[in-house]
Image (cartoon, coloured by chain):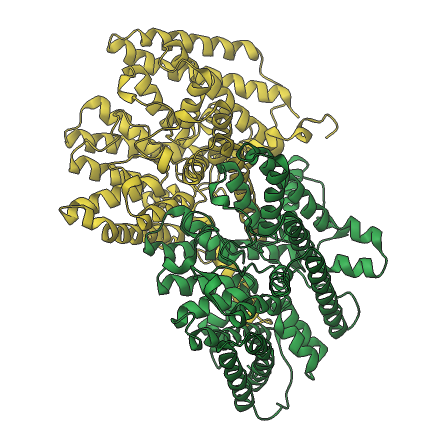
Chain colours: A green, B yellow
Amino acid sequence: MNYKMIRYVLSWVLRVEGVLMLLPAFIGLLYREEAGWAYLIMAAVCGAAGFLICLRQPKDREIYMKEGLVTVSLSWIVMSLFGALPFVLTREIPFYIDALFEIVSGFTTTGSSILTDVEALTHASLFWRSFSHWIGGMGVLVFILMLLPVKSGSMMNLMKAESPGPAVGKFVPRVRNTAKLLYRIYIALTLVEILCLLIAGMPVFDTICLSFGTAGTGGFGILNSSVASYTALQQWIITIFMILFGVNFSSYFLILCKKYKSALLSEEVRMYFLIILSAIALITWNICSQYAHIGDALRDAAFQVGSIITTTGYSTTDFNQWPELSKYILILLMFIGACAGSTGGGIKVSRILIMLKTIKKEMTSLIHPRSVKCIKFDKHPLEHEVLRSVNVFFITYMVLFVFSMLAISFDEFSLETNFTAVAATINNIGPGLDGVGPMSNFGAYSWFSKIILILDMLVGRLEIFPVIILLNPSTWRRKC
Amino acid sequence: MNYKMIRYVLSWVLRVEGVLMLLPAFIGLLYREEAGWAYLIMAAVCGAAGFLICLRQPKDREIYMKEGLVTVSLSWIVMSLFGALPFVLTREIPFYIDALFEIVSGFTTTGSSILTDVEALTHASLFWRSFSHWIGGMGVLVFILMLLPVKSGSMMNLMKAESPGPAVGKFVPRVRNTAKLLYRIYIALTLVEILCLLIAGMPVFDTICLSFGTAGTGGFGILNSSVASYTALQQWIITIFMILFGVNFSSYFLILCKKYKSALLSEEVRMYFLIILSAIALITWNICSQYAHIGDALRDAAFQVGSIITTTGYSTTDFNQWPELSKYILILLMFIGACAGSTGGGIKVSRILIMLKTIKKEMTSLIHPRSVKCIKFDKHPLEHEVLRSVNVFFITYMVLFVFSMLAISFDEFSLETNFTAVAATINNIGPGLDGVGPMSNFGAYSWFSKIILILDMLVGRLEIFPVIILLNPSTWRRKC
């Protein structure tokens, strides 16, 4: 294990976090809030800590698979441990575990909150929460690595560990350039959303925070009613951008290259839109009796569907009051999640597609035992390795889900509450149903359950293996 | 597709069912019930239908994989379609879909009921319900094939399709002899249970019905309170026998051969007992505050754990009133299920074990990328084919689960009701929680949902593929 290199990367994570904290500090000072100073102090602390833990560049800068996994999860944990401190310092979230829950929820773009009254927060903290979504959405590590002198192979190992989806695609030969392109698309889309919302008449501060939350598919709102109190037009804009940020970013790359046909033919993206449209249609039909105008039903259905399938987690209505069918569809969407290669969480549409194709192949081979058929994806045959990794991912995901539920059921909340609490955190959604529905929060859980849910959020964002490799004692044995 | 052979097997299924119906007819006449005549008439109808649909032995007696799968599921469906008729004829269950639900629940050893008042049934029908568990537990098709002149390879294809578990083991070289041995163990264990219960002072009729239900891991009771009103000793006897019928029958075979050490070293059986003991301990600790004596808590915990993990479904208490942790553990046990090669349902302990080993292997290969490790089971390396089939089984199982829930959620029952209704039927358990808890029943569902749940029961008992191959249009295309 290359400990020096891990320390080196961590030191840079802290330095960058220090710089990032200057923004909420600035916002705080702009609004003449004391909290601004807390963020300024923490920015200095992060920077200093970053310099202290690693004074020299290591000679051996190689990162292998194991180091990559460990580095990624450690980075996210260290970033969260420091990122939670401002909340405690400003006494807005006095208990550290609660503050940690909140910031992990931010960085992992979950959006689950332990706060009852969001509106009581300072502008600095509101901004820091939303900003954490934006930072976490694209992954901070790949960004840092673009700045550091790391070899392409090592960078690939870190990208694999941090990026969601069954396989990391390179659009252009060099990893570094692929990463740069991704960040450009991300920033451009965010700016367009900010612009659209400003034109639609939303206040500047709200615009920036909500756009950060949409872009990272996070879900922290700045009002207790989430997005319900904004105008219909503003809600529609957010709906559209949520759905756009759930699309596989390689489609945007193809569009930039003017390969419109390939972008439109992506099986995953087509399936993604098919699921969204079917879900909106079914839910609108199911809830329209509760509304005076079908347009309102459609808007609420579209917003909630977009919010849940992209794992954003904003809400415009208390969908806990919806009929069972609609609630069940939302739960399904929680698990399906967004496209691979987007900022969204969940199992991912491409994995679902691959699993459905596996079933189809099994049936074909039972009916025609002698036929040899391979599974194709986007017209290319799928490698055995990808299939295997999808299977293992799914099985591990289910096992972790089951054990998380077991761990938090000591708290004696209802089955629906516990089930959706784990679903909402492991899929990085935000709100669940019943006791953790959109009008409730996660504050009532014990500290033990909160730690479990924090781990679930990390597991969901980093796609399981980085976290369990970090927690596996045999990773740390000298001999290996 | 060898249609003639399929018809030939189906004709024998009906003839044997006709003979089997003579037993409830006899019971009915013994108790001087009119229902006895209904069963007698139906026995004649089944026999006649059996003779009519196939008058001659087919020349080509080969059964390939596809025919095997189709034959097995068709046999179970035909058996159920005729087996439901006596309930309608005696007007005890006037609606045919309800009667079908009841008898499919019987044959698939589920034990879910649509009846509110079981005690209102005649002895003949009570006996037929329990007897159907016993018939379905071991599978009627393999029994029939022992009598027919079918080649060993064809028989293996049918056994594979009807027997639960990831792989069919042959104890002795000839398939026919393996099947005979299994039936002998099954009958012997049932007789021992009847004897034990008689000695413990249970009435003869109750003894026979309850033993049938235990042996098939079915769960139809003959009292509205299921097993709650029997004595503590009788409950303990049933607990022990439920657990024994959930053990892989190959262990009994090894014991018969005096290979005690191999029987004890079976990983699956050890895991099975480990799960049972942990679950009993946790639940006893969790519920003991609700009981005056810890002995009562232990007895109820052991009974419910044994009943649920073996997918029997008897109950001695309304576990819907238990704390959330205990309820959640029971739900977990529903999915785990019994050992492969037993009469129980669920995912099966061996599949769970194989999946856990897959995760462990994945972690090892991430930590030591160059190590080559194969997964071992009972000290033998697992074939790739078995691993693949376990993965595909699990994925298909989850997909069917999700779609079944979607289909029945149009009925607008609570999430917990729908979730446990599907879990209880697809795992062949019997009762679920909330609206389908041990003190409630499945009668409130619409006919559409009942059909979905009927299919789930068949899917659970026949381990998915026979049923979906039957329902797949491409199975029936001429060209193939």
Percent position (x, y) of residue B164? 46, 39
**Is residue B160 visible in the rendered structure shown here?**
no
State which quarter of the image contains the C terminus of chain B.
top right
Number of numbered markers: 0
Percent position (x, y) of residue A373? 72, 45
> Which quadrant of the structure image shows residue A94?
bottom left
> Which quadrant of the structure image shows residue B320?
top left
State which quarter of the image contains the N terminus of chain B.
top right
Percent position (x, y) of residue A245? 67, 57
Q: Is residue A84 above or below residue B231?
A: below
Q: Looking at the image, which is closer to me, A219 or A122?
A: A122
Direction from residue A479 to residue B429 in the image, left or right? left
Outermost residue, right side: A258
Q: Looking at the image, which is closer to me, A234 or B184?
A: A234
Q: Is residue B365 above or below residue B472?
A: below
Q: Looking at the image, which is closer to me, B156 or A120?
A: A120
Direction from residue B151 to residue B314 in the image, left or right? left
**Is residue A133 visible in the rendered structure shown here?**
yes
For image coordinates 27% across by 37% down, the residue present is B318
Q: Is residue A29 above or below residue B417?
A: below
Percent position (x, y) of residue B114? 38, 24
Q: Looking at the image, which is closer to me, B287 or A25?
A: A25
